[in-house]
Image: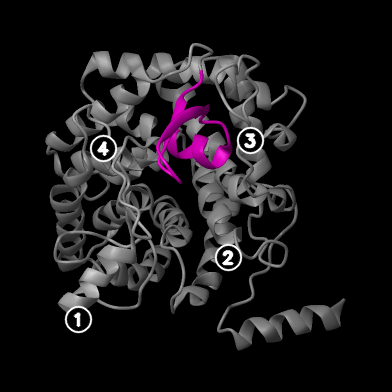
Amino acid sequence: MKKIISIIVFLAAALGLQAVEIPYRQLTPEKALETYCDWIVSQLPRFNEPPFEWYFLFYPMRTLLTGANLLNRPDYAEAVWPYMDRYVEEQLPNGALSSNCRGQPGAKMSQQDIEELLSNGKLNLADNGSNVHGLLLGAVTTTDENRRRRYLAAAKKWLDCWVPIWRLPTGAYGNGIWRGHKLNGPYTMAMNVCSAMAAFTLVTGDEHYIRNAEKFAMWQCDNWHKSGVPIRFNLYPTPSADRFCDDFSRVYYLFEALSWTHYVSKDQKVRARIAQRLKEWIDADLIKRWPENRDWFDMNKSCCQVDDEEIFKAREVVRFYWQACKAAGMSGLLSYYVNNIEERADLRDRVGRGGRYLCHPLKARMLAIMADDVEPTFCMQATGFGGLGVAEALKPCSTFEVYKIGK
């Protein structure tokens, strides 16, 4: 065993990584969040050079910034800035942001480079919605006023110049550009833009953005199946609306977007409509995947549990860990629901058990959390999503309230 550990330490050092000792026992939320953050910091050197997708990093960076604030650890925030700085530097003159790290600042791109990127690149709303959401957390956390202004300016330019191009008359949005794909029909998973819009209003006080988020959210709330589950509007390979939003990789993003719109909106009709739809969704499907005798979701039931699917085609097959890593954050979102929308014992019990599950690193490994030796492709993402759940276990609603810091 000592020889194996020595080999692991040697390989980590060769990659520029720091070995982090993970205690495989039940931890307090404080210790768990610290462990998650230490592990994320140790893995950041893997992302010093492209290629990688930015969303691989932005949820982990949100965990680091939340940990910096909740644990009074400014060093966690310091680890984030080089990556967020690079993300902002890659913004195009028209406000577009790439979902993947290109390693090329926008200011150094030629007109030919820009045209090529617009023809073949990945400049989508869905991924960059969650990325810009995280960038705004960086803006309120940093103590560097120049950096704060730069991050807010980049977010505003994206929201003002790029996002409106893809808005539809219904208030819904398309998904921008994905590998040259420019079909601008309604796209449910572009709802991540609502999270960015809501956060921008929260940080700046400009209510124009939350009104746009409300319109998109209300469009999705109007497109809800009679069974109580949201309909997923897709664009790939062609426009369709014949499936539920059912696997956790999509459930998380839509639930997060609706929760953020609910949190920031001052329109009581909008808030009530979102609350109604989330309740229907939980009762019709989500709670059925989390039996009372389990500490976590039954991942064998990773797809929708609604019986009535007469108009829907066969379920789409997705990689297990692609959705498991997003499922890692679900207890944090359910925490928002029970603390801000509806007090109910069955969900609060599950939120409590889910928090304890995430605070036990050996159990959390089943979702790829801090498990680079088992699932290297998804472990960084999973630790970011799970870290937000741990933060909710430490302080309910902290992953929302943290955006108010420094205002």
Q: Nearer the viewer, mark 2 or mark 4?
A: 4
Q: Quadrant of the N terminus?
A: bottom right
Q: Earlier in the sequence, mark 2 or mark 1?
A: 2
- The answer to whether the residues at label 3 and label 4 have Cβ atoms under 8 Å apart is no
**Label drawn at residue 30:** none
Q: Are marks 1 and 4 in contact (CB under 8 Å)?
A: no
Q: Is residue 218 above or below residue 1?
A: above
Q: Is residue 306 magenta?
A: no
Q: Which mark is on residue 198?
A: 4
Residue range (magenta): 229-254
Residue neighbourhood size for the residue with mark 1, other residues' Cα within 10 Å, grouped as few (<14), some (14–19), many (≥20): few
Q: CA distance from mark 1 to mark 4?
A: 32 Å
Taking the image as shown, residue 350 lies to the left or right of residue 270, namely: right
Tell me which label, 1 or 4, sits earlier in the chain.
Answer: 1
Q: CA distance from mark 1 to mark 3?
A: 46 Å
Does residue 244 show up magenta in the picture? yes
Distance, label 2 to label 3, CA atoms, is: 20 Å
